[in-house]
Each structure stands twice: as C-alpha cells, then as structure tokens.
Amino acid sequence: MMASKLNRLIAALGLKQAHLARALGLSTGTFSDLVNHGRWPKKNPDLAIRLGDRLRRAGASETQIRRAFDPPPPSPLDSSAPEKNARRSSAGRFPAALANAAIPEHTNQGEEMLLQKQTLYAATRKHFNLAADPFTNDIREAADVYLSPDIRFVRETLWQHARHGGLLALIGESGSGKSTVVADFKDRLAREGRDVLIIEPSVLYMEENDSKGKTLKSASIVEAIIATAAPSTPPRRTTEARARQVQQLLAAGHRAGQRHVLLIEEAHCLPTPTLKHLKRFAEIRDGLAPLLAIILVGQPELKQRLAVNNAEVREVAQRCDIVELPPLDGVLADYLKFKLARAGAELASVISPEGIEALRQRLTLAHKTGSAKTGQLSTQWISLAYPLAVANALTAAMNLAAHLGAPQVDAAIVKEA
C-alpha cells in the first residue's frame, strides 16, 4: 500500500511515529490509523493543531502540513466555534476549522512530553519497599527541597533581590519546580528574614485580557500593598490619595528596618499595561533607597514578553533580571537519589544507571530547524527533564517493573513504560 502524505512527511522529517504518539497522548494503534488511513479521533478536537505544530517545529512548512492532512469535503462550518465544527466534521477527516487555524509561533515545548499524571500503586511501593510515594506530597519541610547548584543559585538570587531591591523574573517550564522554589523562598523568609514583608496580589482569576478572565491592574497592586503593609488602615478614596498612601506606608516601613517584596505568580498572564507600570512601582524610593522589590514568577511566555526588542515593554525589560530554572538532566541521578532517600529507599534498589540514562533520553526532545524540502535540517536537543515529567516517567516505569516482577527499573522498562 502506498504510504500516505502524512506518513511520508513524518519520515522525511526523521520523526518516529511512536514518539509522536506518546507526545500527543495517543496509543500507537490510534496514531497509526491516523497516519495511514486518515482516521482522526473524534474526542481530540485540537489534535490537528498540536500535531501540525509538532511537524512545523520539526522543519515542515505550513504548505507541507496542509497537504499532508486529508481535508473534509467543502461544507459551511461556523469558524467561530472550532470544537463545534470538530464534532460536525465527518469521521476520519481533518476538521476544517482546525485546518484554517493559525499554528502558534510560540508554544510551551515542555508540554509535548509531559506524561499524564501517574500514581504509584500500593503494590509498587511494597515491591520497592518504599515508605511513601517519593513524588507525591513530598515537600513538608525545608529538608525535603532538593538543591542542585543551579537551584541554589536561583534561590540565592531571589533572596538577594528581596533584601536589596530590584526587578526580577523567575522563569520555568510547567512542572519545572517554580512553586517549590517560591514556597522554599517564603519559608526561608519566615525563618531568616522576618524584616521582609511579602505582598501578593490575588491572581486567582488573572488573565492577559478581560475577555478570558480578570486582568490584574495597577490599582489592584496598590490595594494589595495597602492591605498588607497596613491591614487596619482603609484605602483612601481617590487614586492620587492611594498612590501617596502607598509611598508613605512603604517609606515608614523602610525607615523602621522593613523590606517589601511584591511577588506576582503566573506573571506570564499580566496584561501589558500592568507590566509596563511595574517600572514605576520599582522606582518608588525614599531618597536613594528603593522601597519595593518586585519578583515575577511565570512560564517561558513571560521571557518572550520581556525581550528587549519588545517595544511595548522595553523600559521594563531593560531593568528586569531574568533567572531560569534549568532541567535536571545534568543532575538526574543525584536528584533521584535524594527523592528516593527521603522515601526510605536507595537509588540502586529502584533504578539502574542504564535506566537513569534511558529516562534522561526519553525526556530529551529533538527540535529540528531548517527545511526538509531542501534537506538542510539541523537538530537541537532540548531537555524536558523537569521534576513533574521525571516523576511521571519514573512512576510509570516503577509500576511496570513491579507488574513484571523486575528487581529494578532498567533501560528496557523505561522505554516500554
């Protein structure tokens, strides 16, 4: 049987169907039906966009991608309702609304290979003689926090900004451990920095624009500063009076030996006007002394928005230090040894050195650039060995090893899990 256009494109890009299936959350059989027979799963209306994005970043042009997908017969579909269109499209066809959708230029590459949440079975814990799941509810005190040299650097950078002021962005992929680092930072402040007051505006409903949720405006930050610095003092009525109130409260606290830190999580969702206004908050001073340190915590989209060539926020970008949480692949064995020891197990009793290397390889993405048409492709290897992905991948492998009765997780088990 002649190979389909999609099959030929995947082969030309040097991709493996099994790897693509795993990245997309599909079984190999389902993905094989899609590639060879054009049978698109009905319950994955965004699958075409995700697959198209994966092919594009592997070097395929949009023309090649669209030719590789089998389009539906012409039919008037509502372009404003992609999910509705996907349900109305005929089975085994590429949904028209998704075919016409723009493939995003920037995506969170870490999400491609993050496995579905895995649970360590009770039988698995018994098999490996584990007192507890090493990756679930595993942070209860400072001693439970793994500190590699890179994480120590990030930790100390946060501490210095809190003590001495400045504008800092902490960037990390989904599952990279940002929440753990921030929680450790707060815990350390409680233990060692009692003169530092953290101000956290609510980000519960925060989105970049009001059509998706509720934007965090500068007025809300002002209210948060007043409520935290002087909880028994009501905000003044006018915006001008509240601004002066903030200046007075911060100055009074600073003269009494107190430092103030504005901490905003999910900062990649900050609206552009608020992001621009942060420069003004950072410039609140008492003479020469800065009164407010600002720490932003967000995903890689925040780094893209803080690029110095982004004219809209260049004044903030030029003043903002950026520190990133790196993947664990360089210290993967040390990380696993630490986590397993906290659960009462030795590394060698759970996973072999070859298994650790296979785990690292499984969480490494080949990102191809260039053109498949001209044959000029280059490969950039991207590690996705962040704590969440490592936990899910190893948990799945440990469950399989226990099911098979294997004494430890080896390379073959990692590849099969």
Image (cartoon, rainbow, N blue to C red):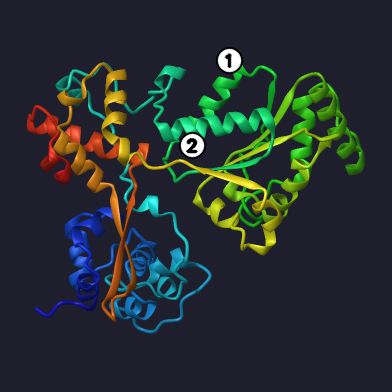
Amino acid carrying label 2: it is: Lys
Image coords of residue 90 (percent x, y): 32, 73
Position of the N terminus, as image quadrant, is bottom left
Horizontal side of residue 118 vs 108, given as left or right: left
Question: 215 or 327, which is in the foreground?
Answer: 327
Answer few, some or many: residues within 10 Å of disc 2's Cα (few below 14, many 20 plus, some between 14 and 19): many
Q: In this rendering, does residue 230 appear at all?
A: no
Q: Residue at x 38, y 77 (%)?
A: 62
Question: 282 or 222, which is in the foreground?
Answer: 282
CA distance separating discs 2 and 1:
20 Å
Q: Residue at x 59, y 39 (%)?
A: 265
Instruction: Work out whether 340 lies above or below 333.
Output: above
Image coords of residue 393 (percent x, y): 26, 40
Q: Residue at x 61, y 39 (%)?
A: 204
Q: Residue furthest front?
A: 288
Answer few, some or many: residues within 10 Å of disc 1's Cα (few below 14, many 20 plus, some between 14 and 19): few
Q: How many marks?
A: 2
Q: Which residue position is annotated with label 1?
A: 191
Residue 85, quarter of picture: bottom left
Q: Which mark is residue 74?
A: none
Question: 46 or 330, which is in the foreground?
Answer: 330
Instruction: Work out whether 53 lies above or below 316.
Output: below
Amino acid carrying label 1: it is: Arg
Question: 337 or 31, which is in the foreground?
Answer: 337
Instruction: Work out whether 192 lies above or below 166.
Output: above
